[in-house]
Image (tube, helix red, strand yellow):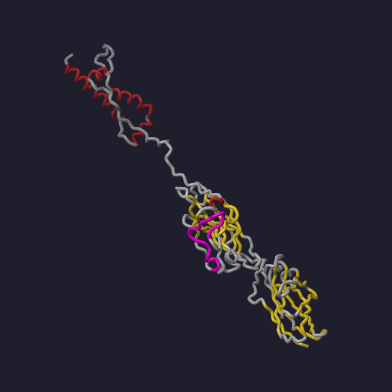
Amino acid sequence: MPEFDNDALLTSAFADFNSEVSTFVKPAGTAAARTTVQHRQKVRTIAAGAVAAIAIVTPVAAYAAIGTDSNGPPATPGVSVSPVETTTSPAAPSTAPSATATAPDGRISKTDLGNATLTIPAWPKGFDEGCGKGAVKFSGGNGGAHPPLKLEGDPAYVDVDHDGAQETVMLLSCSPQGSDYKVLAFDRDASGKIVTLGQVVGSAGSEGKQGADIETIWSVQAGDDGQVKVDVGEFRPCCDMAQASQHQWRTYGWNGNAFTQTGGPPVFGPNPNTVEVSVTVDKLTMTAAGPGTREGTLKVTVHNTSQFATPGKLRVTVGLPDSWTIQAISGCTIKPGEMPVPCLSGSIPAGGSKVYAIKVVAPIESNQSQGDVWVGAQDDKGATYPDKRTSTTANFQIVQG
């Protein structure tokens, strides 16, 4: 057969093939992929023929694909094949792990904290203005010169900033006269240096409002979901004062910039460890009782106006010259060794009253015309509980008979 006849046959074969499969060929893209899936079985056979036909790169391969004569021998396939452009599914995401930053380990022992240089926020105004602030070097759990800062209790470990690593929460105190407190959260930076993340909560100091502000902090605990629990109280005892604070647990959380209260009571309620009484004292009449002395009986009435019983032991103190003496008749017991000498009694229930009778002996030459009575409450060590009265003194008249 002449060479141009072969070309004619090839041209005719391609024309027939194109007519048969053109209805099945769709543009590449999402629609094409969806059509292919819906007609998978029908297209498979036609696609196989299309691949074989497009793969022909020589006239011999094309001629073999369609045949030149029904009685002729089978054609030999070509040896060179070009790839076919097909529609493919989007590539699956890589399963190789991506590099993620690991947060520094902020779990710091009390020993390490107690021998590091720590950044301490400023303290409240008042007695504790002299407490260490800024970069303070600690040694053995104490920091600064005078008054020293001290790490209190055990640290709490909690992931406050939700970075996957725990931070260290620690209670610090400063005690020149009375004590102020701070709860601080510490972490480590990328180089391992201890840094202060922030102040969780602090006491209000000597200028805070007793009974309303946080004045005492006892301990810290790790809460749920990155929260910090703090045991706080509302009184700042100093000198001979008893610790009258209620224990109240409050919860704090890190908002990305600072710690804020997230749980627990927002205010302190009525306190049973305070004194709220009224005092009346009768006129004291002194009469001659023996050689060079006068005597009289002082009557003191105390009414408890509080909704709670008076705390500890009630103490009645009589303000008289040192040369005068007092003796308990009823209602209380004299406790010698203190000046002025107190007369102690048990608690008075809420709304109740008690009358105290006290014998007074004075030198006959004394012309004292007035005295004072103080009523308060004290603990077993003699420290006094806070008094809610604006005036703690009751005056009485002395008449020389």
- Measured along the vertical axis of the image, is residue 31 above or below residue 264? above
- The quarter in which the N terminus is drawn is top left
* Bounds of the magenta segment: 126-144
At x 65%, y 69%, the residue is 386
Q: Is residue 103 visible?
A: yes
Give 390 or 371, whichever is nearer the viewer. 371
Residue 141 colored in magenta in the image: yes
Residue 18 colored in magenta in the image: no
Q: Position of residue 251 (x, y in %)?
A: 56, 56
Which quadrant of the view contains residue 7?
A: top left
- The quarter in which the C terminus is drawn is bottom right
The residue furthest bottom is: 401
At x 16%, y 15%, the residue is 2
At x 25%, y 19%, the residue is 61
- Measured along the vertical axis of the image, is residue 369 above or below residue 218? below
Q: Position of residue 112 (x, y in %)?
A: 54, 50
Q: Position of residue 129 (x, y in %)?
A: 52, 66
Q: Is residue 54 left or right of residue 97?
A: left
- Measured along the vertical axis of the image, is residue 347 above or below residue 118? below
Which quadrant of the view contains residue 78?
A: top left
